Image: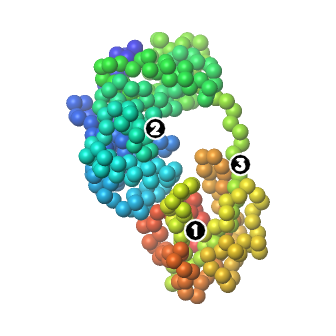
Amino acid sequence: MQGLLLAWYDRHRRILPWRFAPGEVADPYRVWLSEIMLQQTTVATVGPYFQNFLDRWPTVIDLAAADLDDVLRAWAGLGYYARARNLHKCAVAVATDHGGHFPDTEEGLLSLPGIGAYTAAAILAIAFDKPATAMDGNVERVMARLYAVTDPLPGSKPILRAHAASLVPNRRPGDYTQALFDLGATICAPRKPRCILCPWTDPCLARKRGIAEELPAKTAKAAKPVRRALAFVLTDARGYVALRRRPEKGLLGGMMEVPTTPWESAPMPALATSRSHAPLAGIDWQPLPGQVRHTFTHFEFEIGVVAGRAAGAGGGQDLVWVAPDALGDEALPTVMMKILRHGLRA
Protein backbone atom coordinates (compact mmCIF):
# COMPACT_ATOMS: atom_id res chain seq x y z
CA MET A 1 0.00 0.00 0.00
CA GLN A 2 2.81 2.41 0.83
CA GLY A 3 4.29 1.88 -2.63
CA LEU A 4 1.00 2.81 -4.27
CA LEU A 5 0.81 6.04 -2.29
CA LEU A 6 4.43 6.98 -2.99
CA ALA A 7 4.00 6.31 -6.71
CA TRP A 8 0.93 8.56 -6.71
CA TYR A 9 2.85 11.23 -4.80
CA ASP A 10 5.72 11.16 -7.28
CA ARG A 11 3.26 12.05 -10.03
CA HIS A 12 0.89 14.41 -8.22
CA ARG A 13 2.78 16.02 -5.34
CA ARG A 14 1.81 19.62 -4.60
CA ILE A 15 4.39 22.32 -5.23
CA LEU A 16 4.55 24.29 -1.99
CA PRO A 17 6.98 27.05 -0.89
CA TRP A 18 8.34 24.94 1.99
CA ARG A 19 8.53 21.65 0.11
CA PHE A 20 11.78 20.32 -1.27
CA ALA A 21 12.27 18.92 -4.76
CA PRO A 22 13.17 15.24 -5.19
CA GLY A 23 16.83 14.75 -4.31
CA GLU A 24 17.08 18.09 -2.49
CA VAL A 25 18.20 18.00 1.13
CA ALA A 26 15.50 19.28 3.49
CA ASP A 27 16.16 22.28 5.72
CA PRO A 28 14.75 21.57 9.21
CA TYR A 29 14.26 25.31 9.80
CA ARG A 30 11.92 25.63 6.83
CA VAL A 31 10.08 22.43 7.78
CA TRP A 32 9.62 23.61 11.36
CA LEU A 33 8.56 27.12 10.33
CA SER A 34 5.96 25.83 7.88
CA GLU A 35 4.55 23.30 10.33
CA ILE A 36 4.09 25.92 13.06
CA MET A 37 2.41 28.28 10.59
CA LEU A 38 0.15 25.58 9.17
CA GLN A 39 -1.37 24.68 12.54
CA GLN A 40 -5.08 25.50 12.19
CA THR A 41 -4.31 27.71 9.16
CA THR A 42 -4.78 27.00 5.45
CA VAL A 43 -1.99 26.44 2.95
CA ALA A 44 -3.17 29.40 0.85
CA THR A 45 -3.00 31.74 3.83
CA VAL A 46 0.40 30.56 5.02
CA GLY A 47 2.27 30.89 1.71
CA PRO A 48 2.94 34.67 1.74
CA TYR A 49 3.71 34.70 5.47
CA PHE A 50 6.20 31.86 5.08
CA GLN A 51 8.04 33.63 2.27
CA ASN A 52 8.09 36.91 4.20
CA PHE A 53 9.63 35.19 7.24
CA LEU A 54 12.28 33.54 5.06
CA ASP A 55 13.11 36.83 3.38
CA ARG A 56 13.51 38.60 6.73
CA TRP A 57 15.01 35.75 8.74
CA PRO A 58 16.63 33.18 6.40
CA THR A 59 17.94 30.98 9.23
CA VAL A 60 16.91 30.03 12.73
CA ILE A 61 19.88 32.07 14.01
CA ASP A 62 18.45 35.16 12.28
CA LEU A 63 15.01 34.54 13.77
CA ALA A 64 16.47 34.05 17.25
CA ALA A 65 18.20 37.44 16.98
CA ALA A 66 15.00 39.20 15.88
CA ASP A 67 13.03 41.45 18.19
CA LEU A 68 9.88 39.73 19.43
CA ASP A 69 7.77 42.74 18.44
CA ASP A 70 9.00 42.41 14.86
CA VAL A 71 8.08 38.73 14.86
CA LEU A 72 4.61 39.49 16.22
CA ARG A 73 4.09 42.17 13.57
CA ALA A 74 5.11 39.77 10.81
CA TRP A 75 2.77 37.15 12.27
CA ALA A 76 -0.26 39.47 12.60
CA GLY A 77 -3.17 37.97 10.68
CA LEU A 78 -2.18 34.32 11.13
CA GLY A 79 -3.97 34.09 14.48
CA TYR A 80 -3.22 31.89 17.50
CA TYR A 81 -0.54 34.32 18.62
CA ALA A 82 0.89 32.04 21.28
CA ARG A 83 2.42 30.22 18.31
CA ALA A 84 4.37 33.34 17.35
CA ARG A 85 5.73 33.82 20.87
CA ASN A 86 6.71 30.15 21.06
CA LEU A 87 8.19 30.37 17.57
CA HIS A 88 10.60 33.02 18.78
CA LYS A 89 11.32 31.15 22.03
CA CYS A 90 12.03 27.98 20.06
CA ALA A 91 14.38 29.78 17.70
CA VAL A 92 16.29 31.20 20.68
CA ALA A 93 16.50 27.74 22.26
CA VAL A 94 17.79 26.14 19.05
CA ALA A 95 20.33 28.92 18.57
CA THR A 96 21.62 28.99 22.14
CA ASP A 97 21.23 25.40 23.33
CA HIS A 98 21.68 23.42 20.11
CA GLY A 99 24.21 25.43 18.14
CA GLY A 100 21.63 26.52 15.58
CA HIS A 101 20.70 22.94 14.64
CA PHE A 102 17.34 21.34 15.33
CA PRO A 103 17.52 18.06 17.29
CA ASP A 104 16.89 14.96 15.21
CA THR A 105 15.23 12.95 17.98
CA GLU A 106 11.67 13.02 19.25
CA GLU A 107 12.86 13.69 22.80
CA GLY A 108 15.01 16.60 21.69
CA LEU A 109 12.28 18.16 19.57
CA LEU A 110 9.64 17.81 22.28
CA SER A 111 11.89 19.70 24.68
CA LEU A 112 11.62 22.84 22.52
CA PRO A 113 8.94 25.51 23.11
CA GLY A 114 5.85 25.17 20.95
CA ILE A 115 6.68 21.71 19.59
CA GLY A 116 4.18 18.99 20.43
CA ALA A 117 3.80 15.39 19.33
CA TYR A 118 2.45 16.18 15.86
CA THR A 119 5.06 18.82 15.01
CA ALA A 120 7.91 16.68 16.34
CA ALA A 121 6.79 13.75 14.19
CA ALA A 122 6.40 15.93 11.10
CA ILE A 123 9.90 17.37 11.52
CA LEU A 124 11.43 13.95 12.14
CA ALA A 125 9.81 12.53 9.03
CA ILE A 126 10.07 15.43 6.59
CA ALA A 127 13.31 17.11 7.70
CA PHE A 128 15.28 14.04 8.82
CA ASP A 129 13.53 11.26 6.84
CA LYS A 130 12.97 9.16 9.96
CA PRO A 131 9.90 6.97 10.48
CA ALA A 132 7.38 8.91 12.58
CA THR A 133 3.60 9.15 12.83
CA ALA A 134 2.43 12.69 12.16
CA MET A 135 -1.30 12.77 12.85
CA ASP A 136 -3.21 15.79 11.60
CA GLY A 137 -6.82 16.12 10.53
CA ASN A 138 -6.05 14.93 7.01
CA VAL A 139 -4.38 11.76 8.26
CA GLU A 140 -7.19 11.05 10.72
CA ARG A 141 -9.73 11.32 7.92
CA VAL A 142 -7.76 9.04 5.59
CA MET A 143 -7.30 6.39 8.30
CA ALA A 144 -10.95 6.54 9.36
CA ARG A 145 -12.01 5.83 5.79
CA LEU A 146 -9.28 3.36 4.91
CA TYR A 147 -10.16 1.16 7.89
CA ALA A 148 -13.86 2.14 8.16
CA VAL A 149 -13.51 3.34 11.74
CA THR A 150 -17.03 4.44 12.62
CA ASP A 151 -16.40 5.41 16.25
CA PRO A 152 -16.58 9.22 16.47
CA LEU A 153 -13.72 11.62 17.06
CA PRO A 154 -12.12 12.52 19.37
CA GLY A 155 -12.61 9.16 21.08
CA SER A 156 -11.35 7.24 18.04
CA LYS A 157 -7.99 9.06 17.92
CA PRO A 158 -5.99 6.21 19.55
CA ILE A 159 -7.18 3.58 17.07
CA LEU A 160 -6.64 5.94 14.13
CA ARG A 161 -3.13 6.67 15.35
CA ALA A 162 -2.42 2.94 15.70
CA HIS A 163 -3.55 2.34 12.12
CA ALA A 164 -1.41 5.24 10.87
CA ALA A 165 1.66 4.05 12.78
CA SER A 166 1.35 0.56 11.31
CA LEU A 167 1.70 1.97 7.80
CA VAL A 168 4.73 4.26 8.19
CA PRO A 169 7.49 2.80 6.01
CA ASN A 170 11.21 2.75 6.71
CA ARG A 171 11.83 3.75 3.10
CA ARG A 172 11.06 7.39 2.25
CA PRO A 173 9.08 8.15 5.43
CA GLY A 174 9.29 11.89 4.75
CA ASP A 175 7.76 11.58 1.30
CA TYR A 176 5.19 9.13 2.66
CA THR A 177 4.15 11.61 5.35
CA GLN A 178 3.76 14.43 2.83
CA ALA A 179 1.91 12.07 0.49
CA LEU A 180 -0.65 11.40 3.23
CA PHE A 181 -1.08 15.14 3.76
CA ASP A 182 -1.62 15.64 0.03
CA LEU A 183 -4.00 12.71 -0.25
CA GLY A 184 -6.21 14.13 2.48
CA ALA A 185 -6.05 17.67 1.12
CA THR A 186 -6.72 16.94 -2.54
CA ILE A 187 -8.39 13.51 -2.92
CA CYS A 188 -9.75 12.22 0.40
CA ALA A 189 -11.42 15.56 1.06
CA PRO A 190 -13.94 16.15 3.87
CA ARG A 191 -16.79 16.41 1.38
CA LYS A 192 -17.21 14.53 -1.88
CA PRO A 193 -13.99 12.49 -1.75
CA ARG A 194 -12.63 11.74 -5.22
CA CYS A 195 -12.39 8.00 -4.62
CA ILE A 196 -11.99 7.14 -8.30
CA LEU A 197 -8.65 8.99 -8.34
CA CYS A 198 -7.36 7.63 -5.02
CA PRO A 199 -4.34 5.29 -5.06
CA TRP A 200 -5.92 3.43 -2.13
CA THR A 201 -9.34 3.01 -3.70
CA ASP A 202 -9.08 -0.82 -3.69
CA PRO A 203 -8.11 -1.38 -0.04
CA CYS A 204 -10.38 1.39 1.30
CA LEU A 205 -13.08 -0.25 3.44
CA ALA A 206 -15.25 2.85 3.69
CA ARG A 207 -15.44 3.10 -0.10
CA LYS A 208 -16.42 -0.56 -0.35
CA ARG A 209 -19.19 -0.03 2.19
CA GLY A 210 -20.37 3.23 0.64
CA ILE A 211 -19.79 5.27 3.79
CA ALA A 212 -16.66 7.24 2.86
CA GLU A 213 -18.37 10.62 2.96
CA GLU A 214 -19.81 9.88 6.41
CA LEU A 215 -16.37 9.43 7.97
CA PRO A 216 -14.76 10.39 10.19
CA ALA A 217 -17.73 10.55 12.53
CA LYS A 218 -17.54 13.32 15.09
CA THR A 219 -19.17 13.93 18.42
CA ALA A 220 -21.52 16.89 18.17
CA LYS A 221 -19.90 20.08 19.40
CA ALA A 222 -21.53 22.23 22.01
CA ALA A 223 -22.40 25.77 20.97
CA LYS A 224 -19.57 28.20 21.62
CA PRO A 225 -20.04 30.58 24.54
CA VAL A 226 -20.23 34.30 23.81
CA ARG A 227 -18.08 36.96 25.43
CA ARG A 228 -18.75 40.68 25.13
CA ALA A 229 -16.81 43.87 25.68
CA LEU A 230 -16.83 47.58 24.91
CA ALA A 231 -13.90 48.96 22.89
CA PHE A 232 -12.64 52.54 23.19
CA VAL A 233 -11.36 53.93 19.89
CA LEU A 234 -9.52 57.08 20.98
CA THR A 235 -7.88 59.55 18.58
CA ASP A 236 -6.10 62.84 19.17
CA ALA A 237 -6.14 66.12 17.24
CA ARG A 238 -3.67 64.69 14.70
CA GLY A 239 -5.85 61.65 14.09
CA TYR A 240 -3.41 59.33 15.86
CA VAL A 241 -4.95 56.28 17.55
CA ALA A 242 -4.34 55.20 21.15
CA LEU A 243 -3.22 51.57 21.54
CA ARG A 244 -1.81 49.59 24.41
CA ARG A 245 0.00 46.28 24.82
CA ARG A 246 -1.77 43.23 26.22
CA PRO A 247 -0.14 41.23 29.03
CA GLU A 248 2.48 38.74 27.84
CA LYS A 249 0.54 35.76 29.15
CA GLY A 250 -2.94 34.81 28.04
CA LEU A 251 -4.97 35.25 24.88
CA LEU A 252 -3.26 37.50 22.30
CA GLY A 253 -0.41 37.90 24.78
CA GLY A 254 2.07 40.64 23.95
CA MET A 255 0.02 41.95 21.04
CA MET A 256 -1.18 45.53 20.65
CA GLU A 257 -4.84 46.23 21.31
CA VAL A 258 -7.56 48.84 21.34
CA PRO A 259 -8.42 49.43 25.03
CA THR A 260 -11.51 47.47 26.05
CA THR A 261 -13.55 46.52 29.07
CA PRO A 262 -12.95 42.97 30.39
CA TRP A 263 -14.16 40.25 28.05
CA GLU A 264 -17.04 38.65 29.95
CA SER A 265 -19.92 36.24 29.39
CA ALA A 266 -22.50 38.88 30.31
CA PRO A 267 -24.73 41.29 28.42
CA MET A 268 -22.97 44.02 26.47
CA PRO A 269 -21.59 46.50 29.02
CA ALA A 270 -23.17 49.93 29.06
CA LEU A 271 -20.99 52.99 28.54
CA ALA A 272 -22.32 54.57 31.73
CA THR A 273 -20.88 51.75 33.86
CA SER A 274 -17.68 51.23 31.81
CA ARG A 275 -15.93 54.60 32.02
CA SER A 276 -13.48 53.29 34.62
CA HIS A 277 -12.01 51.07 31.89
CA ALA A 278 -11.58 53.92 29.40
CA PRO A 279 -7.96 54.76 28.48
CA LEU A 280 -8.41 58.44 29.46
CA ALA A 281 -10.77 60.26 31.80
CA GLY A 282 -12.86 63.22 30.77
CA ILE A 283 -13.46 62.09 27.18
CA ASP A 284 -16.82 62.60 25.48
CA TRP A 285 -17.37 59.02 24.31
CA GLN A 286 -19.87 58.48 21.51
CA PRO A 287 -21.40 55.02 20.98
CA LEU A 288 -21.15 53.88 17.37
CA PRO A 289 -23.93 51.95 15.62
CA GLY A 290 -23.49 48.24 15.06
CA GLN A 291 -21.11 45.75 16.62
CA VAL A 292 -17.89 43.98 15.72
CA ARG A 293 -17.97 40.18 15.81
CA HIS A 294 -15.05 37.79 15.82
CA THR A 295 -14.73 34.03 16.25
CA PHE A 296 -12.03 32.56 18.47
CA THR A 297 -11.39 28.85 18.83
CA HIS A 298 -13.35 28.49 22.06
CA PHE A 299 -15.77 31.41 22.05
CA GLU A 300 -17.57 34.02 20.00
CA PHE A 301 -16.67 37.64 20.69
CA GLU A 302 -19.07 40.58 20.34
CA ILE A 303 -17.71 44.10 20.73
CA GLY A 304 -19.53 47.37 21.04
CA VAL A 305 -17.46 50.36 19.97
CA VAL A 306 -17.35 53.91 21.35
CA ALA A 307 -15.23 56.69 19.88
CA GLY A 308 -13.66 59.71 21.50
CA ARG A 309 -11.24 62.55 20.76
CA ALA A 310 -8.42 63.56 23.12
CA ALA A 311 -7.02 67.07 23.28
CA GLY A 312 -3.46 65.75 23.30
CA ALA A 313 -1.45 62.54 23.23
CA GLY A 314 -1.58 61.86 26.95
CA GLY A 315 -2.61 58.91 29.01
CA GLY A 316 0.58 57.75 30.68
CA GLN A 317 3.14 55.19 29.62
CA ASP A 318 0.67 52.42 28.87
CA LEU A 319 -0.76 54.16 25.78
CA VAL A 320 0.99 54.25 22.41
CA TRP A 321 -0.21 56.79 19.84
CA VAL A 322 -0.02 55.52 16.27
CA ALA A 323 -0.69 57.30 12.99
CA PRO A 324 -3.52 55.67 11.00
CA ASP A 325 -1.22 54.90 8.07
CA ALA A 326 1.22 53.18 10.44
CA LEU A 327 -1.27 50.80 12.04
CA GLY A 328 -0.16 48.06 9.65
CA ASP A 329 3.29 48.19 11.25
CA GLU A 330 1.92 47.32 14.69
CA ALA A 331 1.40 43.81 16.06
CA LEU A 332 -2.38 44.10 15.86
CA PRO A 333 -4.42 40.89 15.82
CA THR A 334 -7.28 40.57 13.37
CA VAL A 335 -10.00 41.32 15.93
CA MET A 336 -8.33 44.64 16.79
CA MET A 337 -8.05 45.59 13.13
CA LYS A 338 -11.79 44.92 12.82
CA ILE A 339 -12.48 47.21 15.76
CA LEU A 340 -10.28 49.96 14.31
CA ARG A 341 -11.88 49.74 10.87
CA HIS A 342 -15.31 50.03 12.47
CA GLY A 343 -14.32 52.90 14.76
CA LEU A 344 -12.22 54.96 12.35
CA ARG A 345 -14.69 54.58 9.49
CA ALA A 346 -17.42 56.04 11.68
Judged left or right of residue 203, residue 50 is left
Q: Is mark 3 on a helix, strand or loop?
A: loop
Amino acid, disc 3: Pro
| Residue labelled with disc 1 | 258
| Label 2 – label 3 distance at C-alpha | 27 Å
Question: Identity of the amino acid at label 1?
Answer: Val
Which residue is disc 2 drawn over?
Answer: 116
* Percent x, y of residue 188: 49, 26
Q: Position of residue 313 (x, y in %)?
A: 53, 83
Q: In this view, does 295 lie above or below 137?
A: below
Comes first in the chain, label 1 or label 2: 2
Residue type of the residue flagged with mark 2: Gly
Q: Mark 3 points at which residue?
A: 225
Question: Gap in Å between the C-alphas at discs 1 and 2?
Answer: 32 Å
Of the two numbered discs 1 and 3 on the same chain, state the one appearing first in sequence.
Answer: 3
Eyeballing the image, is 197 above or below 185?
A: above
Q: Can residue 227 be seen in this view?
A: yes
Q: In which quarter of the image is the C terminus?
A: bottom right
Q: Which residue is drawn at 52% across and 27% down?
A: 140
256 relative position to 266: left or right: left
